[in-house]
C-alpha cells in the first residue's frame, strides 16, 4: 500500500506538464550556469533509465558529453537552459524517483523583489508580502519564509499576497531584524532573494473608521461637519501609547476641488465649508510610517 501511494505521488509529479508549473517542487537541485551537478535516483533497482522533461519534450537520456550515466547517478556537465527540467528515473516496475534540475539565475537578475507591509505591531496579525519580477517572461511559482522566527514556507498566495506569521512583541524594542527569504522556480530556472527589516519599518495601518457626528448649516458656505475618526480594528491598544496621525480629504461643493487637512490629537475633527464627500487615512505618529490606504468616500448630506 505504501509503495502504491509513493508511486502515485511520483507519477502525478512526473506527468504534470512543465509548461504549467504552478507549484514549488518538493525535490529540486540548483546549479549556476556552466556548473556540473550529480543527480541520484533513490531506488534499490540496479537497472534504471533516465528521462528529462522540459517545457516542450520528454526524452530518454543516453550517455553523452554533457550527461554522464553511472549506476543510479546522472552527472550533468556545463549546465545551460537546454539541460534543465524534470529528471525522472524508471525501472521495469515504473517510475522510481524524480528531481527538478533548475538553473540558478539569482546573480543574473536584480528585478526580483519582495515588498512587505504590516498593519500593526501585534503578532496576532500576519505580515503581507508581494513579489515583483520584471525581466523574465517565464511563469514562476513562488514561496516565502520568515527565517528570523523560524517560520514555515508559504507557497499559496491569496490574490497575489503572501501572509507570513511573526513573533514580534508590540510592547518591546525589536533586537533582531526580520529576514524574509523568497524563492522562485519556473520550468527551467530558479531565483532567490531576501529582504531584511524591523517590523516598525514596514508598518502601514489599515484605513481608519470615519463617522459623521453632526452637520450644522447644511448646504451653506458656513457648513460645519463634525467627524469622529477611530483607529482601525487591527491597531494595537492602548491608543494613547500608539498614537496615529490622521488626514482628511474632502471635495468642495461649488468647484469640485479636493483639499486635505491633518491633525494629531483627539478623535474628533471639524471641517468647515460646503463639501460633498470626504475620506480619511492615517499613519503612525511617532514613527511616521506609511500612510494607510484611503477609506471609502463618505457622502456629506
Image (cartoon, rainbow, N blue to C red):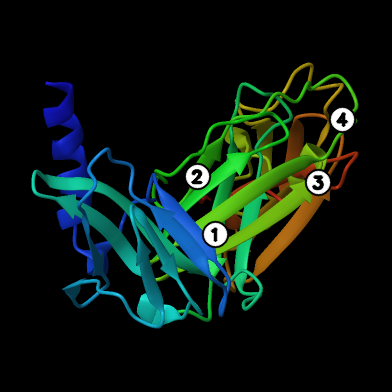
Dot 4 or dot 1: first in sequence order is 1
Horizontally, residue 123 falls left or right of residue 176, namely left
Dot 2 or dot 3: first in sequence order is 2
Q: Residues within 10 Å of mark 2 (few under 14, many from 20)?
A: many
| Numbered tag placed on residue 174 in the rendering | 4
Horizontally, residue 125 falls left or right of residue 264, namely left
Q: Quadrant of residue 93?
A: top left
Q: From the viewer's side, name the closer residue of 173 and 84.
A: 84
Q: Do the residues under discs 1 and 2 have CB atoms within 8 angstroms?
A: yes
| Numbered tag placed on residue 201 in the rendering | 3
| Numbered tag placed on residue 162 in the rendering | 2
Above-or-below relation of 193 to 64? above
* Residue that appears at 47% across and 60% down: 38
Between marks 3 and 1 in the image, the one whose residue lies nearer the viewer: 1
Task: Compute the Cα span from label 4 to label 2.
Answer: 23 Å
Secondary element type, mark 2: strand
| Pointer 1 residue | 131
Secondary element type, mark 3: helix
Q: From the viewer's side, name the closer residue of 92 and 299.
A: 92
Task: Compute the Cα span from label 4 to label 1.
Answer: 25 Å
Q: Do the residues under discs 4 and 2 have CB atoms within 8 angstroms?
A: no
Amino acid at each position: 500500500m505504501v509503495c502504491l501511494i509513493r508511486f502515485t505521488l511520483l507519477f502525478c509529479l512526473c506527468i504534470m506538464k512543465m509548461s504549467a508549473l504552478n507549484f514549488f517542487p518538493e525535490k529540486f537541485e540548483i546549479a549556476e550556469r556552466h556548473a556540473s551537478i550529480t543527480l541520484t535516483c533513490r531506488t534499490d533497482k540496479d537497472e534504471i533509465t533516465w528521462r528529462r522533461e522540459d517545457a516542450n519534450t520528454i526524452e530518454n537520456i543516453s550517455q553523452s558529453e554533457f550527461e554522464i550515466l553511472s549506476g543510479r547517478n546522472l552527472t550533468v556537465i556545463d549546465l545551460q537552459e537546454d539541460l534543465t527540467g524534470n529528471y525522472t528515473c524508471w525501472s521495469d516496475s515504473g517510475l522510481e524517483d524524480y528531481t527538478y534540475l533548475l538553473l540558478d539565475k539569482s546573480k543574473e537578475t536584480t528585478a526580483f523583489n519582495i515588498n512587505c507591509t504590516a498593519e500593526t505591531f501585534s503578532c496576532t496579525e500576519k505580515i503581507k508580502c508581494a513579489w515583483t519580477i520584471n525581466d523574465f517572461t517565464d511563469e514562476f511559482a513562488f514561496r516565502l519564509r520568515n527565517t528570523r522566527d523560524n517560520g514555515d514556507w508559504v507557497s499559496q498566495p491569496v490574490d497575489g499576497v503572501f501572509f507570513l506569521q511573526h513573533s514580534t512583541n508590540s510592547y518591546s524594542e525589536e533586537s533582531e531584524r526580520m529576514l524574509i527569504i523568497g524563492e522562485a522556480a519556473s520550468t527551467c530556472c530558479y531565483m532567490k532573494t531576501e529582504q531584511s527589516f524591523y517590523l516598525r519599518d514596514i508598518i502601514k495601518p489599515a484605513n481608519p473608521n470615519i463617522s459623521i457626528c453632526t452637520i450644522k448649516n447644511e448646504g451653506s458656505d458656513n457648513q460645519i461637519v463634525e467627524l469622529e475618526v477611530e483607529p482601525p480594528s487591527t491597531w494595537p491598544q492602548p491608543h494613547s501609547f500608539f498614537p496615529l496621525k490622521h488626514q482628511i480629504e474632502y471635495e468642495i461643493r461649488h468647484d469640485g476641488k479636493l483639499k486635505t487637512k491633518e491633525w494629531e490629537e483627539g478623535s474628533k475633527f471639524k471641517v468647515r465649508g460646503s463639501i460633498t464627500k470626504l475620506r480619511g487615512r492615517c499613519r503612525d505618529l511617532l514613527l511616521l510610517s506609511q500612510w494607510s490606504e484611503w477609506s471609502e468616500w463618505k457622502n456629506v448630506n
